[in-house]
Structure formats: C-alpha cells, structure tokens
Amino acid sequence: MNRKTMVLPALVGLLTSVLAGCGSADGAGSDGDAIVVGSTDLIEATDTAPAPLDPAQVYDVGSWGVMHNVFQTLMRMPRSGSTPVPDAARSCGFQDKQSEQFRCTLRKGLTFSNGHELTARDVVFSFERTLAIDYANGPQSLISNIDKVEAAGELEVVFHLKSPDATFPHKLATPATALVDSEDYARNKLRSGFEMSGSGPYEVSVETSENRLTKAVFTRNPKYQGAVEVGNSKVEMRFFPDAKAMEKALNAGDISALNRTLSPEQIVRLRDKIQGDVKLTESSGQEIRYLAFNTDAPGVRDKAVRKAMAQLVDRQALVRDVYQRTTVPLYSLVPTGTSAHTNSFHNTYGDPSVSKARKILRDADVSTPVKLTLSYSSDHYGPASTKEFQALRQQLNDSRLFEVKIQDVPWTKFRPAAAKGEYAAYGMGWYPDFPDPDNYVAPFFGPDNFLGSPYRNTTIEDVLIPRTRQQEQRTVAVRDFQQAQDIIADEVPVLPLWQGKQYVATRDGVTGAEWAVDDAGKLRLWELGRGVKG
C-alpha cells in the first residue's frame, strides 16, 4: 500500500499491548475500559490533500489502518491465509472463464452506522465516485480496470472488467473499495476533514489539532454484519509527533499499546529486555523499501548510472549498521515469503563491487563522478531514514564514481513533488495492497503507475502482467513474474533495498496481538482483547 505509498509511513509494524490491571492505572490510559493504542502516523488535511480519511483520496498505510476498522468492503482478508472471504457480501465470484465478469450478492439487512440502509446502489456509487473523482496519487488505479459496475437488484452487484484480472477479489478487500453512503458522501467531491461514516466493525469519533488527527475513538458498531468478530468494545488511538514521545507515554501508563513507528534502537531495547512482562515476537513482514528513479531526469536517464548504483549499494551493511538487523536485505521488488520471489538483483550484480560499477559506467561512456541528489522524507518513513540515506551517500561517494548529496523533505511536499518528477532519485516504501506478486509489479509500471514514473517496458506491461492476470491458479503465473523481476534488475527503474520484519510485543494478559497487524501493515483493532493475567 503506498502509491500505498506508499504511501508507506512505517519502518516496521510494531504493536505493543499493555494490559491494565483491575482497578489500577497500569497502562490503562485515561479512558477506562478502552484499549489505548499509540501511533506516530501523520494523518493531516492539506490544501492538496483535504480529505485524509476519504476512500477516494487515501492511499497510504497509516490512514488505511484507521479506515480499515470503520469502513466495510465486499471482501476481506481472513485472519490467516491469502484468499479473501466475503464481508459486506454474502458471496462473490467470477461468472466467466476469462475472469472479466465478477458478481457479488450482499448480505441482507446491511446498514451504515448512521442507520441508512446499505444496498447495491451504494456499492455502485462508491466505485463510480472514486473513479470519477480520480484524485492524483489516490487509489483509483486499483480499480481502473472496471469498465462498468451495475446493480442487478437490491442485493446484486455485477462488475464488468476491461480485461481479465484474477486479482480482482483481492482488490475488493482493500480500503480503496470501501463502501460509502450515497446519501452522505458527494458524488464528485472529496469529503474534507476527518469525519467518517461506514458500516464496518467500529463507529468512530475524532479529535484534531491544526488540521492533524490527534485522537480517534473506536466504539463497537452494533449494526455491523460481516466476517470479523470484534473482541473488544472500545479502542482509542492517539497520535504522537515522534517515537520518543510515544514511548514516554507508554512508560507513563498514558497509553496501553504502541503501533508504528519505532526506531531500530527501540525495537532492540524491547527485543533484548530480559526482565519484566514484555514479550517481543518477531515474524517476517511484507513491507519493502527502495530507491525510485525518474528515468527522464538528467543524471539517471542513462541506464548505466542506475546499474552502477545497483552494483555499489551494500544492502547487508544497511541492514546491519543502520537497522541493527531489524530488517533483511531485499534483492527484488517481490519480497521473500511471496510466491514468485527470486533474487534477481543479486543474481545480476552479485556482491557490491567498485570495479564492476566502474566498468559499467566506462562501457557506456558516462563521465565520473556522476553528480546526484537523493531525496527522502524522514517524517514519513521513520527516524532511521536519515541514517539510511547518509549511509547510501557514503557508499556511493566512497567509490569515487559518484558525488552524491542528500535532502530530507517533509512528506506533505515530498510526495507531490516526487509524483511530478521533481526528484531524480528518491526513497520510497511500499506495503502490499494484497498478498500477491502482482501487487509488487503492476503498480510500478504502465502509464498510470503510482510513482508517476516515465519508465516503460512493453514486455512487462503488454505481455507479462496481462498474462499473469488470466491465471486464477496463481502458481501458474510464477514464471512470468520471475521474468518481470529479471527485467527490472537489468534496467533498474527502481532499486530494492530492504524488507521489513514485523514485531509484536505484549505484556502479560493481552490477547490477539499476534493477529492485530495484517501483512499489509493495517491494524485489525477488533483482534485486541483483555485476557486473564498469568
């Protein structure tokens, strides 16, 4: 998820839940029975992005983590597994062998939290609205393959696709397809501000300061009908300016949980803590971090420059020295743990080598040192980003083949500028919209790619992606995805750096923490509960 920019504000998803003792203030926060969750996600309204919680605008993991608990979708990813299940729908499925017509039957008696009935007309409205608003950097690219969506009665919805897409059920489980009330949302205009009304597991009330979300209180929605079981009656999210302030609030007992984004140092402190009630569980994650290139920009237009950078970057050093092994090196856009992953960049370039990089530039008649600025946004991707880009600068400059400068840009300026092609090379992150290799390939290529990149490859766009989307049996598509990864390694329109891990830390008595963050980094607040202290 960013497009889902990546639309990606986190280093790693870390959830630390602290149980309040009966009749005590131990981690209970100030709100009684509420499970209080802290976050450093920056969710704000700006002139260019006025609706930070409107499904037609939002395409970042932080906002999606809030929306995921309030809005309902036709499908939903289960607690475990990679096959979506019906949520607002009672059943869904393709109606043809070509995977071009998809039909859903809604549950009976669905209502929005405001009491309005949810019918097939609202479903049609929700999809047509997102496509009509067509917000720059928004999620509409996920559903742009819809040719027409129609209501076939009060409970039947039929999607007609422009081309086959076996991943369409997965897309119906993302907040990009959140269902909104046609009586409450304008058809051709974003809903400015932070108010939400949906049909999901929770109702929500919000508090803001200076156009930033500071608190969201989630109360179980008694009208919800869907696939999840809500394990609590109330959750409160509080948003902090940085990880230090959030950690301080935890230690003071002002919050009862932590989620996103902690520094590697904070993770190591929790991981190495021997005494106390905190338990840290580590598992693989699906977040990736990479350098993106404006392949029309001077300095990186020549493929040889990008290939030389791929030959020089030492991912092992980044993971060891910057992230203290809280991440793992990544040698493809498709991460490990995802079907079709292959280490294409390592297969192509091997270990870092100055001599090989020099030969690449010399054979292409590129003068050295190549002058280049690397741009990044530390207020979006966490406090380690500055150290990461300092390390990248040193790696490239130590080769004497590059003369690199770095610049840190606030996210509210960084993302629009990157999409307009103002940076030659810049740091981005990505959480998957859904667990399929398609979501690590298709969003990055084509005229509507979320980066706004001018790079084009007809084999990937016109052959491999369409062919993989015809395969409902995803294992059949593996070879084509691997070919796409090899092409990316050869032409380097993006340069993968590392893959995140996921950490869950809990205190004695907390339940549900192992399920509370999904593969895409979104919070499942309904999984949190209070158990009995051991």
Image (cartoon, rainbow, N blue to C red):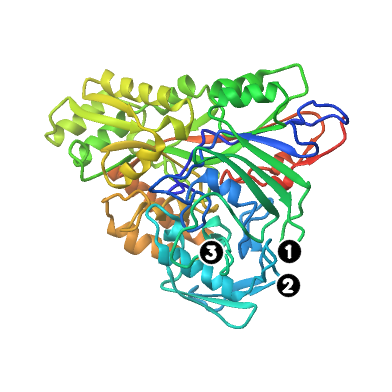
Q: Which of marks 1 and 3 precedes in the sequence?
A: 3
Q: Position of residue 406 (x, y in %)?
A: 30, 26
- Residue at point 51%, 66% (across, down): 166
The amino acid type of the residue labelled 2 equals Gly
Q: Secondary structure at mark 2?
A: loop
| Disc assigned to residue 185 | 3
**Contact check, label 2 and label 3, Cβ < 8 Å:** no
Q: Position of residue 319 (x, y in %)?
A: 47, 26
* Circle 1 Cα neighbour tier, 10 Å, few/some/many (<14 / 14–19 / ≥20): many
As drawn, 39 above or below 526 = above
Q: Secondary structure at mark 3?
A: loop
| Disc assigned to residue 109 | 2
Q: State left or right for residue 494 relative to residue 333.
A: left
| Disc assigned to residue 430 | none
Residue 347 visible in this rendered orientation of the protein: no
Q: Mark 1 sits on what residue?
A: 225
Residue 82 visible in this rendered orientation of the protein: yes
**Contact check, label 2 and label 1, Cβ < 8 Å:** yes
The amino acid type of the residue labelled 1 equals Gln
